[in-house]
Image (spheres, rainbow, N blue to C red):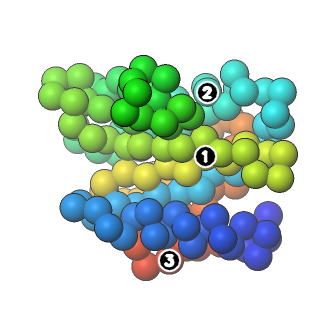
Amino acid sequence: MSETAHADLYRETVELLRPGDIELAGAVIHTTYDSDEESKLHQLTLDAGRAVADHTEKGDTYVYSGNDSDEFGVNQHQGLTLDDDEFVWECQQLRRDDEFVVVLYWEVTGDDDAVVADIAAVDGVEEAVAVTEDGFDA
């Protein structure tokens, strides 16, 4: 993928990370899935969230999905801790130019390059572009 083809999405993701109370890192995940493969997108989202959770020291997590609540958007998911519902990661699943894209972000771990590398290794990921408050690495 070229940077210019998705530059607006990357910039929007940078802005999404900036206003938070905690320092966030993220990734824009380009998938190999088309609109007929939404169930595979769901599994990719779970696996990418697990990759993030594996780099935190927050314990066991579960996924809270948008269709579980009126206060949360459809195709928006959060990884929360089992013990106290603490934030681990959040994502939005998008469809751009007939491809599924996942915008995923998490609290900075100190080893976010490794997090992005693990996300990039998830089945169905074409490319994972690292995003921070300072910009993106496309």
Q: Quadrant of residue 59?
A: top left
Asked if the residue at tag 2 contacts the one at tag 3, i.e. Cβ–Cβ closer than 8 Å, the answer is no
Quickly name the residue at label 3.
Answer: 135
Q: Residue at 65% of width from left, 45% of height from top?
A: 94
Q: In this picture, is 70 found above or below 99?
A: above
Query: How far is mark 3 from mark 2, CA to CA?
Result: 27 Å
Quadrant (top left, top right, bottom left, bottom right) of the C terminus = bottom right
At 23% across and 41% down in the image, what residue appears? 57
Q: Residue 17 bears which disc, if any? A: none
The reply, left or right, for residue 30 in relation to residue 107 is right
Residue drawn at point x = 60 percent, y = 68 percent:
10
Q: Position of residue 42 (x, y in %)?
A: 61, 27
Question: To which residue does mark 1 refer?
Answer: 102
Residue 117 showing in the rendered view: no
Residue 42, which numbered label? 2
Residue type highlighted by circle 2: His
